Image (cartoon, rainbow, N blue to C red):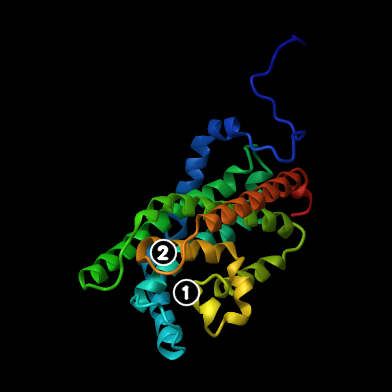
Amino acid sequence: MSNQRWLYEISSKKPLLAFNFKEVWRYRDLLFLFVKRDVVTLYKQTILGPLWYLIQPLFTSVIFTLVFNNIANISTENIPSFLFNLAGITTWNYFRECLLNTSTTFTANAGIFGKVYFPRIIMPLSTVISNLLKFGIQLVILTCFYIYFLLKDASVTPNYTLIAFPLIIFIMALLGLGFGMIISAMTTKYRDLTYLVTFGVQLLMYISAVMYPMSAVANGKLANYGWIVYYNPMAQLINAFRYMIFSIGLFSWLHIVYTLLFAVIIFLIGLLIFNRTERTFIDTV
């Protein structure tokens, strides 16, 4: 009996950078259940339901168009202002939702974590995957407006770099997951950080080229703060997406590689901190 080998062994002793793909795959049914839970419960008792996925970016685009383009007179490089803002907001929203929802992993799921074992990384992964559905719905509405303006002979033309769009999504997911895991570990001890993160993400949007082109940073009113935007990976990703569908601005594969490397480093740091916090968070949360 003493020589009996266990099929699975659960132990807290594992490398801090461990990401057990085999174990995550073994719990894939649970992962899909969490994804379904995130999608269904969010708008379960709302009147409009999933339509909020469409209303939010549309209203935000209208407000940005009125404030930044009509009042502040920020140029969108001959692209219809509404469409320009909608493209930026759609891209930004996916990163924002991944970051904010992942950042509450430990505090929001302490009850589940304290009762049953499963790979804790499944929880933030489910957030990233469930947000893909919301992102997909918003891409559909963006595509509809894109076709409308294209038929009106607006100066919008896609180009071959659009094939790299899945890579853009992957990098945004890595960034949101990495930063979210870092913050989720910190909020187990410092609850006030949750409110600071919401405010910080809002500020981050303004240095991520969501409502203005990168050319405004280099040559316009924002030139003095250009380096902040230039080295912001989300600004580079949003700029790259706009180039893919509008063929405006500058596109560099070097910038894409930079954002990918940055995202991988942030993800590894987040994974390390997440795994370390996972061992003891239940005592402090």
> Residue 151 is drawn in which quadrant?
bottom left
Q: Is residue 60 above or below residue 92?
A: below
Farthest residue, direction bottom: 71
- Mark 1 — residue? 213
The residue that label 2 is drawn on is 243
In space, the residues marked 2 and 1 are separated at their CA atoms by: 10 Å
Picture quadrant of residue 162: bottom left
Quarter of the image with the N terminus is top right
Residue 51 appears anywhere in the view: no
Q: Secondary structure at mark 1?
A: loop
Label drawn at residue 188 = none
Discs 2, 1 touching: Cβ within 8 Å: no
Question: What percent of the width, then of the height, locates residue 134?
Answer: 42, 57
Q: Who comes first in sequence, dot 2 or dot 1?
A: 1
Q: Nearer the viewer, residue 258 or 63?
A: 258
Q: Residue at x 71, y 11 (%)?
A: 4
Question: Where 67 sits versus 129, above or below?
Answer: below
> Residue shown at 47%/76% (left/top)?
212
Decide: is 100 above or below 18. below
| Rendered location of residue 191, percent (x, y) | 72, 64
Question: At which x and y percent is residue 26?
Answer: 55, 30
Kind of residue at disc 2: Tyr
Q: Position of residue 74 (x, y in %)?
A: 45, 84
Question: Which secondary structure lies at badge 2?
Answer: helix
Location of the C terminus by quadrant is bottom right
Q: Residues within 10 Å of mark 1 (few under 14, many from 20)?
A: many
Q: Residue at horizontal 36%, vertical 62%? A: 245
Residue type (three-letter) at the residue carrying disc 1: Pro
Taking the image as shown, residue 96 lies to the left or right of residue 1, namely left
Classed neighbour count for the residue bearing mark 2: other residues with Cα under 10 Å, few (<14), some (14–19), many (≥20): many
Q: Which of 232 and 109 lies nearest the eye of the viewer?
A: 232
Residue 111 shows in the view: yes
